Amino acid sequence: MMTTARPQEPSKSTPSQGSSEDTQQSKRKRDQDEDEVDGESAKNKTARVTRNATAEAAEAVEGETIRQTSDDQELSLADLAEAVPALKNMHARMKGGKRQVGKRRSGDKFKLSPSLFDVFADRYLAARNAHKGVDYQRLSTTKYFKDFKGHAEELRTKKPELKVLLKKALAEQREIDAGTPMKNIEALEEEVARLDVQHKEDVAKCKQLEVDIKQQEEQHSL
């Protein structure tokens, strides 16, 4: 008697252990990639916020300087052309009267003398006539401003002081031309001295801001 073989039931297929591990590894890698992207985004965002905050602080320093001086408006080209020779006349009067506004003291490397302000005024007038800004980098390499070589930004900080002097010189020259007695020379000296101190403080603040942002960027890069 022949025995009929029972058909075997088909085995149920289950995911292999290798496939399961592959899936888990893929998930872990995807999560890791997302974490890295999120971390990089957070780092970039923090650095961007830091740079923006520093830029705003620097603008605030510059804005405060402008508000505190009489340098709110540019002289017109016509007034500037009149003010430059007026400045030279004013310096000549002060020299004759033994007044040395802007005279550089020993050890004060970045202090402009009256004669250097006269040269600076000529360059400023030439730049305005050409409808462009003063090239401080180039100016700092000339024989007149050799002490500023490699320190063009120090020379740039003298511009507000120059503009105050030009306005004062123009006002005084017009008073002389009109036969009005000169006045407030002492006030001019005080304002120039105050501007010099204020500019040094602003330069120090900007340098400290640069140090702060560099330190923060180094911390975020770790």
Image (cartoon, grey):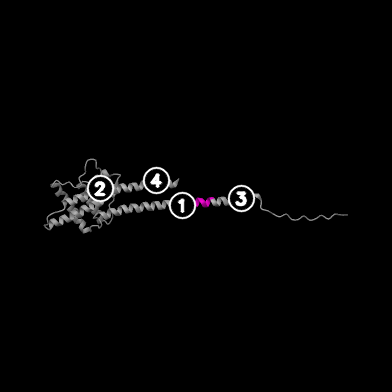
Which residue does the image show at 40% across and 53% down from the upper left? 49
CA gap between label 3 and label 4 equals 43 Å
Residue 138: percent from left, percent from top:
29, 48
Which label was assigned to residue 85?
A: none
Q: Is residue 123 left or right of residue 20?
A: left
* Residue stretch in magenta: 32-40
Q: Is residue 1 left or right of residue 171?
A: right
Assign the magenta stretch its main secondary structure.
helix
CA gap between label 1 and label 4 equals 17 Å
Does the magenta run of residues contain 37? yes
Q: Callout 1: helix, strand or loop? A: helix
Marks 3 and 4, the one that precedes in the sequence: 3
Q: Label 3 is placed on what type of residue? A: Asp
Residue underneath mark 3: 22
Residue underneath mark 4: 215
Which residue does the image show at 60% across and 51% down from the upper left? 24
CA gap between label 1 and label 2 equals 41 Å
Which label was assigned to residue 197?
A: 2
Q: Residues within 10 Å of mark 1 (few under 14, many from 20)?
A: few
Q: Judge whether 65 appears above or below 107 on screen.
A: below
Q: Callout 2: helix, strand or loop? A: helix
Marks 2 and 4, the one that precedes in the sequence: 2
Dot in front, 3 or 2:
2
Marks 3 and 2, the one that precedes in the sequence: 3
Which label was assigned to residue 42?
A: 1
Marks 1 and 2, the one that precedes in the sequence: 1
Q: Label 4 is placed on what type of residue? A: Gln
